[in-house]
Amino acid sequence: MEQQPKKSSMIQKVGIGLLSGVIGGALSFGGLYLATGSNSSNSTTVTNTATNNSGSTNVSNVKYNVTSDVTQAVEKVQGAVVSIINLQSNNLNDQYNGLFGNNNQNGNNSGSTDESNLETASEGSGVIYKKDGKTAYIVTNNHVVEGQSELEVLLADGTKVKAELVGTDAYTDLAVLKIDSDKVTTVADFGDSASLKVGEPAIAIGSPLGSEYANSVTEGIISSLNRQVTSTNDEGQEVNINAIQTDAAINPGNSGGPLINIKGQVIGINSSKIASSGTTSGVSVEGMGFAIPSNDVVTVINQLEKNGKISRPALGVSMYDLSSISSEQQEQVLKVPSSVKSGVVILSVANGTPAEKAGLEKYDVITKIDGQEISNTTELRAALYKKTVGDTMEITFYRGDQEKTVTVELSVDQSILNQSNSNSNSNNMMPGQ
């Protein structure tokens, strides 16, 4: 999964099976295997003995008052974990209503969604992170709420309430919902994902296989940090996560639920897993789940609460990885020094954009952003999206064999360029750059 210079979109290019942790409402299954265990500390033990009247065998009823770091962490946050139910219109029912005379004969066509035709399309997880007066806020994944007609939230106590979508961000796969706060008793705290250590405990809470198994807990460790995970959602939008990797079990339905540390703080929002290698051999993969780091989550949800969307700056270029271009093309067309092994090639520059104003040109090869080396388009985009509209960014690049540096004023919002980019059929076009 780790991104090398030639592997910026490894998950897509080599066909690794990246599964979003959201479970469809129509899923059925015939068997279930439950494995239980405990990570307990010593405590008071009470033993009661019962005698089986049909023989001499005794059943010992041993009760433990189990308390551990894990149980305490779970107890702290579990009440804030919810199931998200994505309701969508059943088009087939709509057609049947028309065929069999349910055509609103009173002539009252309000255009509103008929709730009787809404069905559960998918289920995921979420966590309540804020309570503000009569409103409580929930963070989940964007792919959990995609295509929704309405949303319902199943609280930890079994209460089901309606939810309103505040805003979404496809790029980071995050969404914010709000509900009435009168039934909310627990709010989760965010921990500092920048202080995580590989090998420390990690606990996932959510609804694997949907709300029937709501508030399930799995435990593992932090397997790795800063994994660049890229994929494409159902609407064709690119998802790019600088992820926490964990071996805590992440299953369909866990998406949007919290990954917590041993102190019960949310350190990530579970988003996806690798289930198979995607090769012809179909090698099965276990224990490779990914979560969006809490520090990134907080940055995004604060903007979504305020504006309902994320505003990101754009350069105004289409790009391609240098490592994907043949040595012959690099030598004859780009003419960069042989020592330049990685970077991003500019294929076109849009008129009136920050890139054009800064003097960037076709076939320039970008190698550094603000003095930090970048190897591919994924890393460039990640550096760009850390900025806000109005910031400046220093770009180091090669034009032929000459290294140059320019300062770019990021004065354009990516939404301005998205429409023209979406109309392009070029596979080299990177939206919003």
Image (tube, helix red, strand yellow):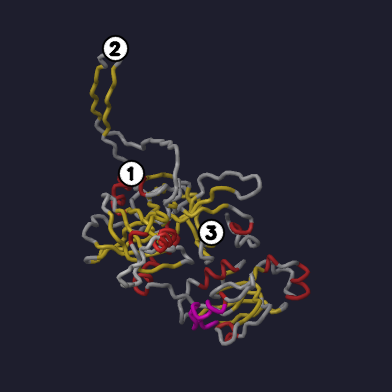
Disc 1 packing (10 Å; few <14; some 14–19; many ≥20): some
Q: Can you give x and y, in whole percent of width and height, for residue 170 in the image?
A: 47, 66
Q: Residue at x 63, y 59 (%)?
A: 13
Mark in front: 1 vs 2:
2
The numbered dot on residue 55 is 2
> Split into 4 quadrants, where in the image is the N terminus?
bottom right
Q: Can you give x and y, in whole percent of width and height, for residue 115 in the image?
A: 33, 61
The numbered dot on residue 69 is 1
**Residue 417 inside the magenta-drawn segment:** yes
Q: Residue at x 28, y 17 (%)?
A: 58
> Split into 4 quadrants, where in the image is the C terminus?
bottom right
Identify residue type, mark 2.
Gly
Q: Is residue 181 left or right of residue 254?
A: left
**Residue 144 inside the magenta-drawn segment:** no
Magenta-tinted stretch: 408-420
Quickly name the residue at label 3.
Answer: 229
